[in-house]
Image (cartoon, grey):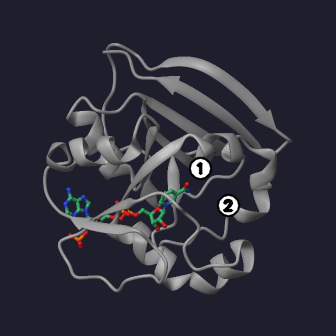
Amino acid sequence: MKTQYYAATSLDGFIATEEDSLDWLFPLGEIGSSSYPEFIANVGALAMGATTYQWMLRNADKVVAEVGSPWPYEQPAWIFSHRQLPLIAGADLRFCAGDVRAVYADMKAAANGKNIWVVGGGDLAGQFHDAGLLDELILQVGSVTLGKGKPLFPRRVLHPTLQLVAARPMGTSMIELRYEIAR
Ligand SMILES: NC(=O)c1ccc[n+]([C@@H]2O[C@H](COP(=O)([O-])OP(=O)(O)OC[C@H]3O[C@@H](n4cnc5c(N)ncnc54)[C@H](OP(=O)(O)O)[C@@H]3O)[C@@H](O)[C@H]2O)c1
């Protein structure tokens, strides 16, 4: 069982524009040609921050068009927020706030031997890393730069370095990099 931060990033390290747009990402690759199908099959619980959840709320039409429902995940999801956010029909949601360690045991129990996916944003992934709970970064790096935006992983990780365990080209516009976090 691992805790994984799986995300797509621009070449210069942003996962969304400053306005929380992902429009730069969708032309870069087909989700079906990525590791996503096998990745999600092994996920038992999700964690996401409020802005990421609000993206799902704002883009419900797009999500319905793609997967037929406004919430694409079967697994329980922990939404980190200090606010009361609207619910999404059919989603198994648990709202929480504060130290990620306080909910980790519940997430692990719900995951029932499967992996925990930290969906994002970058700082939430950083909070799991700060707590010593993050095992892997799985990054689809797109061949575009955004100049500024929401950061992939706003932490300084120097020693030990992240350990590259796989690199898989996805056509000519993306590459997937898988790093283990050494402790
Ligand atoms: N490219 C990709 O693969 C990818 C992946 C994931 C997300 N995204 C996008 O990237 C952007 C990420 O936005 P973001 O960087 O602002 O990150 P975010 O993690 O989605 O949202 C940050 C917000 O989450 C809440 N939060 C975070 N940690 C918390 C904690 N411990 N306790 C309580 N609340 C907590 C806070 O909201 P409040 O205090 O205001 O409630 C905080 O302002 C979004 O646009 C998302 O759609 C892209």
Q: Mark 2 packing: few (<14 Cα in 10 Å), some, or many (20+)?
A: some
The residue at 50%/75% (across/down) is 56
Rendered-image quadrant of the N terminus: top left
Residue 31 disc label: none
How far across and down, in percent of the image, does residue 116 sit? Answer: 42, 42
Residue at 14% in and 47% down:
102
> Could you tell me if residue 159 is visible in this image?
yes
Between residue 61 and residue 16, name the one nearer to us. Answer: 61
Q: Is residue 142 visible?
A: no
Question: Which amino acid lies under the numbered mark 1 shown in the image of this protein?
Answer: Ala
Please state which amino acid type lies under the numbered disc 2: Leu
Q: Residue at x 58, y 58 (%)?
A: 146
Instruction: State the residue position of label 1.
Output: 8
Left or right of 32? Residue 8 is: left
Q: How many marks?
A: 2
The span from disc 1 to disc 2 (Cα, nearest Å) is 8 Å
Ligand 1 within 8 Å, label 1 CB: yes
Residue at 50% x, 84% y: name it.
Answer: 58
Q: Which quarter of the rendering shows the C terminus? A: top left
**Residue 4: x percent and y percent?**
45, 37
Q: Evaluate if marks 1 and 2 touch, with contact meaning CB atoms under 8 Å apart.
A: yes
Q: Quadrant of ligand 1?
A: bottom left
**50 shown above or below 77:** below
Q: Nearer the viewer, residue 72 or 143?
A: 72
Instruction: Report whether 83 appears left or right of 141.
Output: left
Residue tagged by mark 2? 25
Relative side of 168 to 145, left or right:
right
Q: Secondary structure at mark 1?
A: strand
Q: Between disc 1 and disc 2, whose residue precedes?
A: 1
Query: Residue 109, image x and y in percent?
Result: 30, 42
